[in-house]
Amino acid sequence: MIKQYFKAVWAQLKQQPMISMVSVVGTALAIFLIMLVVMIQQVKVAPYAPESNRDRFLHTMVVCASRGESENTISSMSERTFNQLYKLLETPEAVTAYGVFTAAQPVGLPGQATFSVDMRGTDDVYWKVFDFEFVDGKPFDKATLKSAQRVAVITESVALRLFGTTQACGREFEMAHTPFQVSGVVKDVSTMAYRAYAQVWVPYTLGIDFDFGDHGGIVGSLSATILARSSSDFPTIREEIKKNLLAYNAMLKETGYQVIDFNQPYDQEKASMLVLSNSVEPDVAAAQRMRWMIFLILLIVPVINLSSMTQSRYRQRVSEIGVRRAFGCTRSELVVQLLGENLILTVAAGMVALLLSVGFAYIGTDFLFVQTLPTMSTEMPEVNITMLLQFSTFGWALLFCFVLNLLSTCIPAWRASRMNIVNALEGSTFNNR
């Protein structure tokens, strides 16, 4: 049966090349625009290294140190706040604290010109939560973090620029005119993996501002990511954090401050929508409704046009439809056949659209993938094919192919199946029964 559908489609392409080509191009354009919207969202939430566990992540970016109506300071966390709220959680697999921003720092070798890199302070658990690919050496450990040793993990591109090789473990360089020893070298990280991104990582204990020391000791420069064992553990983890928050606020009572956490931590989708300038809890449901409205608008116009062209193709097949009906083909079988034939064309157009959208997204990275989270990095957004081509991407493409095919073909196919057999054999139009 499938083979017959392909033969019928090929025959239609040869008999009506112009209409068939316009139908394919129209379908491809519609799916192309939809897939761009899908990819822009997927780059923010789909898993890829070194954030391969995004479906198990919970994030806290900021907290508010509140003293009634007189003072509300919104900032990232201090080490003390992180320790009280997150460090000792029992349910998650791992919890890490790291600098909320990267900071530009000059690096180089003694006597050579320096260049700027994006540096981030982290703890030792950071390397367990995010799955970096080490090409040389290893991450720093807990003892190194506590003693604030001047070691660093650097990217391949930084290692090549400094030493001319990626085998740089144990070698020394200067950052901000201070000597550092290379602990490990990792593959370069895209800026779109916001929480894992940097070019140089050092123990956060080397920073002078990881704990600001005022506002009740609540605020500092740290954010947190929780790696759950399963997304089903999210409610339990949040309940555990609420208990810790109550205990921490009770401890802070004598200072007059309390911590407001804006119902954090957020999962990956919700965290990707956070705007730090106002720290309002993102409305995920509203954002999802908006995306579905965009999909609907992008589908409606081509569906109307494609329905007209599909009906035009079927008008030229009136006699063929009459012969099939005369030899016992039922209306339901005819509808299934016409839907199947059109689905083949739609899927072919969808695959073309998918390739076009990936190519366009790859070329147009600079203006398509704008960071919603603020960053000190001067690096432009960077995506690769593995980030754009997820299994879910193919799933979305096939879904929209199916929906577009169903909407644009269902009515013309139904009208064709309802034709009077005698009129169809005479070559009459759909209006004659």
Image (cartoon, rainbow, N blue to C red):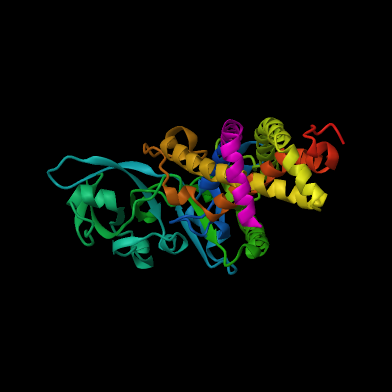
Q: Quadrant of the N terminus?
A: bottom right
Viewer-proximal residue among 68 and 29: 29
Q: Quadrant of residue 423?
A: top right
The answer to whether residue 396 of the structure is visible from this angle is: no
Give coordinates of residue 24: x percent, y percent: 58, 37
Q: Residue at x 77, y 52 (%)?
A: 333
Q: In which quarter of the image is the C terminus?
A: top right
The furthest residue to the left = 111
Viewer-proximal residue among 371 and 250: 371
Q: Residue at x 26, y 49 (%)?
A: 158
Give coordinates of residue 225: x percent, y percent: 52, 56
Give coordinates of residue 378: x percent, y percent: 37, 36
Viewer-proximal residue among 36 and 88: 36
Question: Is 260 positioned to the left or the right of 99 in the image?
Answer: right
Question: Is 38 positioned to the left or the right of 184 in the image?
Answer: right
What predominant SS class does the magenta segment belong to? Answer: helix
Viewer-proximal residue among 250 and 260: 260
Q: Does the magenta stretch include residue 409?
A: no
Magenta residues (range): 1-30
The furthest residue to the front = 426
Give coordinates of residue 198: x percent, y percent: 37, 48
Q: Does the magenta stretch include residue 26?
A: yes
The answer to whether residue 296 of the structure is visible from this angle is: yes
Question: Is 324 positioned to the left or the right of 246 in the image?
Answer: right
Vertical order, 70 against 249 (above or below): above
